[in-house]
Amino acid sequence: MSKLYLPEGYAPALSLYETQKAIGLIKRIFEDTLCGALNLRRVSAPLFVEASTGLNDDLNGVERPVDFEIRDTATHAQVVHSLAKWKRLALHQYGFAPDTGLYTDMNAIRRDEELDNLHSIYVDQWDWEKIITADQRTQAYLRQVAGQIVQAIISTETTLRAMFPVLERVPALRREVTFLTTQELEDRWPDLTPKQREDAICKEAGTVFLMQIGAPLKSGKPHDGRAPDYDDWQLNGDLLFWNETLGKAFEVSSMGIRVSPESLDKQLTAAGCDARRSLPFHKALLAGELPLTIGGGIGQSRLCMLLLGCAHIGEVQSSVWDAATLAACRKAGIPIL
């Protein structure tokens, strides 16, 4: 409840049922557009993985997975946080070729999430991953793919507004993308916190791809935490938009060129995670047995919330909220599903 923001005079642009129709439209259009832009094919994905494989995403390294014992197999399973590592292994097992990739609906439970307008314990996103060549492991290629994702979002927004003209009251997203690194952001606003810097640059630029997340900056601290075993900290980024309804930066996607054997070796040591070297996924990656890839997650509820001008993620997904949040939202005219 402490982080709940109630926009003054807020009213949803669409009714509850119109919102459901719009969500379905957004998902169909965006999936098709994204797949065409990045040459992706749909696959099925797990809801949980065996803990011993090391395939679960560790996020910032402190979040506890939802775990349980499987009686008949006598194994320990974890509900996924995301599919960052699983996708790379799947590309290898399915025999995908360079410049082709996969996407899937990912559903996760993040029990330690701090709940607010943007964060729920239920996470739904499009997880995607694509095989690349060694000469594509560059910042230029990363920017190119980020730009393609932005254009897919803008195209979806255009169709959505044609179908629901009332959404013209929601400020349109900015097509032009501003690219910069976390160090450039810190250099510009050294006295602000990382989140305050994101707010400042997004309010100014509208659409931002913020790169190089995970390694310490000149201040001695990283801009944000990032697990050491999926993104290359020098070749990753977050896609941010200015959210006029909430008056703040709004992250829609976290993505990056994945670690090579060399960068994984370096980042595991830097993060104090050398014990992971013995896990099956990490052993295969360090041995060069897995393909070079780029990938990320794109929040489904996040994207719907942004395009529909919603004030709370609970307007576009069903989850669990505390009683005080529900009462405050009801009083403020925010319909929580």
Image (spheres, rainbow, N blue to C red):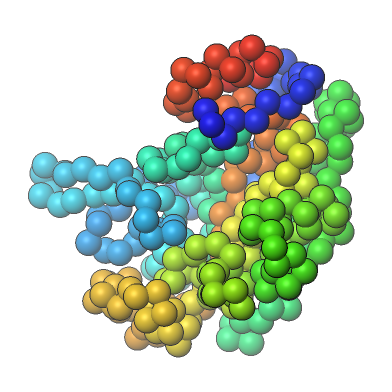
Give the vertical position of 204 relative to 22 (above or below). below
Residue 118 in which image quadrant: top right
Q: Is 224 in front, or is 92?
A: 224
At a point 30% along the width and 64% down the height, the residue shown is 54
**260 relative to 185, above or below:** below
Residue lying furthest front: 191
Pick the quarter of the image with the C terminus.
top right
Viewer-proximal residue among 174 and 35? 174
* Left or right: 266, with 224 as reference point: left
x and y percentages locating residue 154 in the rendered image: 81, 48
Front residue of 126 and 215: 215
* Whether residue 94 is situated above or below residue 301 in the rendered picture: below
Write the residue at 16% across / 44% down: 69
Asked whether, in this view, residue 38 is left or right of residue 13, the answer is left
Looking at the image, residue 298 sits to the left or right of residue 286; the answer is right
Q: Is residue 190 visible?
A: yes
